[in-house]
Image (cartoon, rainbow, N blue to C red):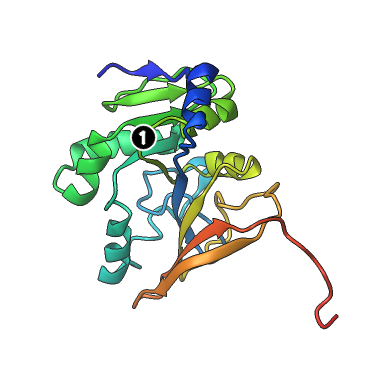
Amino acid sequence: MRDSVVRISSHTANAICYYDYMRKIITATFITMDGVMQAPGGPEEDSSENFKYGGWQAYLGDDETSKVINTYFAEPFELLLGRITYNIFASYWPNHPEIENVAKPFNATRKYVVSHNSIALPWNNSHLITGDVIEEIKKLKATEGPDLFIWGSGKLIQSLLTHDLIDKMHILTYPVTIGSGKKLFAGGTKPKVFKVTDSTVSPSGVIIATYEPAGELKTGTIGQ
């Protein structure tokens, strides 16, 4: 299938909304205890801003963590990715079919790539979202199809959180600190309350939790 630019007409989106269909946007993020999400899998993933700790996740995994991650692939999904994560995935997953549980669904599914500029899309079944990105993603959520899964893509997540477009967040917190690097919750994060819908701790100390938005943050004084 040729690459294409997503341009969903408001008429189409409204027609689908009439039937009350809305697919979810779900994130899956590996972070350190101090919130860094940059380049967990290897030094070559993202060394921007002179990041020297790529691959911090490599020796902290275990079978229990892998088992939970595999559940994220149990249901059909499509990928929604930022440009940097897309480029990392596009250069890796087509070349590693031996990691079948991840490579097979990633390579087969439709991939939506968010970028403010026109970019090459070498991975099969890739589609560019550009222009008014937030409005285009709102329309995309209203189309028929499986849920949209975001891996990595920190800036995209932050932008979608600001506009209340994320429905569920899987956050895997690894027992390590780095002190520098791109963070999941960067400056400008919107005050919000989340509820924990699932959680576990793996033998190697990875805290695996699933969060869903639960309304606006309320403040007060403890004991009053």
Quarter of the image that includes the N terminus: top left
Considering only vertical position in the picture, is 32 above or below 147?
below
- Regarding mark 1 in the picture, which secondary structure is present there? loop
Residue at the left extreme, as displayed: 98
Residue for point 40% across, 30% down: 112
Label 1, on which residue? Answer: 145
Quarter of the image that includes the C terminus: bottom right
Q: Quadrant of residue 95?
A: top left
**Amino acid type at image mark 1:** Gly
Residue for point 48% across, 65% down: 197
Q: As drawn, is 23 to the left or to the right of 72?
A: right
Q: Which of 215 and 51 lies nearest the eye of the viewer?
A: 215
Considering only vertical position in the picture, is 131 above or below 152?
above
Give the percent coordinates (x, y) of residue 81: 43, 36
Residue at the front extreme, as displayed: 19
Q: As drawn, is 104 to the left or to the right of 127?
A: left
Residue for point 31% across, 33% down: 90
